[in-house]
Image (cartoon, rainbow, N blue to C red):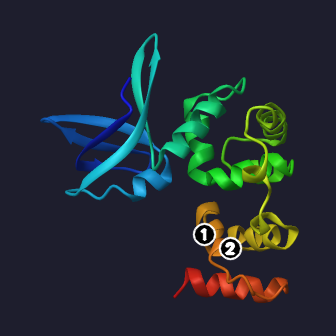
Amino acid sequence: MIASIQGMVAQNSQDSVVILVGGVGIEIIATRPALEKCQPGETAFIYTRLIVREDSLTLYGFAGDYERDMFDTLLKVSGVGPRLAIAILSNLSTDNLRNAVVTERAEILTRVPGIGKKTAQKILLELKDKLPTGLDAIPGEAFDDMNSDVMDALVGLGFSIVEAQTAIQALPANAPKDLQERIRLSLQYLQP
């Protein structure tokens, strides 16, 4: 099992990175948060999971062990393979995914390319029993209806789901409950 890789980043693309380790370039298909940590010419550390198939050995990379754990959990859902799990974790933070499951909001998952309504509902149903419950699973303010509308507006304006989530999480705790004001504050964050 290859649990992590550390080395110099040789190159990165939209969905993978090549890290040099002992003179060997290792390609890792990674989540967007992991790829953001990888700049060519710099040293990077990525948590990994090796998936062995009949015709391939593929390394998948993550920004943290929490992402890798969620990847493992997603793979237990029937019909979700490694590529779809990576797409989910590239478009939704682990907290947002957990909150989507707890609040049973399939529309959050349908924002991920490749996931339709039926697949989203299936994922929610199967993850409900697989994710931890208790205080860690209580949905936070980030998923109330107001912020969901803010996210929809930002995505409609062309921002990625990850950018929209980041802007919403950056809103001050005392931000007004007015939708237009929250959108304005989010846009200020995204376009300094």
Q: CA distance from mark 1 to mark 2?
A: 5 Å
- Left or right: 148 with respect to 4? right
- Left or right: 45 with respect to 116? left
Residue 5, image x, y percentages: 31, 39
**Residue 111 visible somewhere in the drawing:** no
Residue 84, image x, y percentages: 61, 36
Give the numbered dot on residue 166. 1
Say which element carries label 1: helix
Residue holding disc 2 = 168
Give the numbered dot on residue 85. none
The residue positioned 70% from the left and 55% from the top of the image is 96
The residue nearer to you, when weighing 113 against 4, is 4
Q: Which quadrant would the N terminus be assigned to in this image? A: top left
Task: Assess disc 1: are there few (<14), some (14-19) or many (≥20) residues with their C-alpha within 10 Å of its C-alpha.
Answer: some
The reply to whether the C-beta atoms of the residues labelled 1 and 2 are less than 8 Å apart is yes
The residue positioned 37% from the left and 45% from the top of the image is 46
The residue positioned 42% from the left and 39% from the top of the image is 29
The residue nearer to you, when weighing 158 against 70, is 70
